[in-house]
Every structure is written in C-alpha cells, then in structure tokens.
C-alpha cells in the first residue's frame, strides 16, 4: 500500500476524492491486473485510462473511467472505423475523445 501511494502524483494530495479514486485504480493495477490475461479491447487498458482520467479530470475522470468500463465489451468492435481507430489489433480510445472539454461528443447510434 505504501509503495502504491509513494507513486502518487503531487497534485493529487490536495483533492481527497482524486486521491481515493487514483489509489483504488492503482491497487487494482498492482495486485489484480497482472493475474488476468490480456482481454481488453482497447490499446490503452481500462485501468490505465481510468488512472489518467482521474489524474487529469478529477471526479469527471471517475465518470469517464466508469463509462469506459461499460464500453469495454465485444460489441465495441462494431464502432471500429466510426468512433474508434484500430491499431495493432486493439481499438484506440483516447482521453480527449470523451473529455469534458471536447467540442462535440461523438454521437453513437442506438440499435
């Protein structure tokens, strides 16, 4: 636990929610992520996406990470080429695609 918190970025010390969300994701990465096989559909894994989102956007980043987990399923391949690019057999989903500062959120047709 101490090693996980030692790698905490200094800007997160001032926001307890960001610190808590970051620590939970980091604990998952250290203890559980290596046990599981590579099953993520995206080139930036969901836990790395979530950690970066929480670091950059705080509580909004927590919601971005939650949204990403809901999108990480075999059905997301149907959006390849429309919203997501494909690189080395993985879908590319960047933080900027769904950030709170984006000008236009991609529209996804419901089926």
Image (cartoon, rainbow, N blue to C red):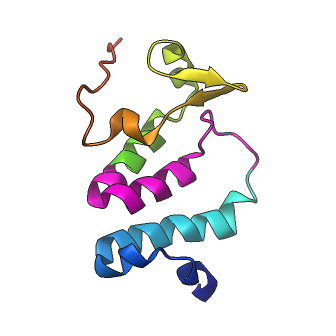
Q: Position of residue 53 (x, y in %)?
A: 41, 53
Q: Quadrant of residue 110?
A: top left
Indicate whether residue 44 is drawn in magenta: yes
Q: How many marks?
A: 0
Q: Position of residue 32 (x, y in %)?
A: 67, 63
Q: Residue at x 66, y 25 (%)?
A: 87
The image shows residue 50, relative to residue 18, as above or below, that is above
Q: Residue at x 57, y 77 (%)?
A: 7
Quadrant of the drawing holding the N terminus: bottom right
For this orientation, the residue located farthest to the bottom is: 2
Q: Is residue 53 left or right of residue 4?
A: left
Question: Looking at the image, which is closer to me, 68 or 96?
Answer: 96
Q: Is residue 81 left or right of residue 106?
A: right
The image shows residue 95, relative to residue 41, as above or below, that is below
Magenta-drawn segment = 37-63
Indicate whether residue 21 is drawn in magenta: no
Q: Quadrant of residue 100?
A: top left
Q: Residue at x 36, y 46 (%)?
A: 64
Q: Position of residue 81 (x, y in %)?
A: 52, 12
Quadrant of the drawing holding the C terminus: top left
Q: Quadrant of residue 106?
A: top left
Q: Main secondary structure of the magenta part?
A: helix
The image shows residue 7, relative to residue 91, as above or below, that is below
Q: Position of residue 66 (x, y in %)?
A: 39, 48
């Amino acid at each position: 636990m101490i090693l996980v918190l030692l790698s905490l970025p200094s800007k997160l010390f001032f926001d307890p929610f960001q610190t808590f969300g970051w620590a939970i994701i980091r604990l998952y990465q250290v203890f559980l992520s290596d046990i599981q096989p590579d099953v993520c559909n995206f080139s930036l894994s969901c836990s790395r996406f979530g950690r970066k989102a929480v670091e950059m956007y705080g509580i909004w980043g927590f919601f971005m990470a939650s949204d990403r987990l809901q999108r990480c399923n075999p059905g997301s391949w149907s959006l390849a080429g429309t919203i997501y690019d494909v690189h080395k057999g993985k879908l590319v989903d960047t933080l900027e695609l769904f950030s709170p500062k984006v000008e236009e959120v991609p529209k996804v047709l419901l089926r």
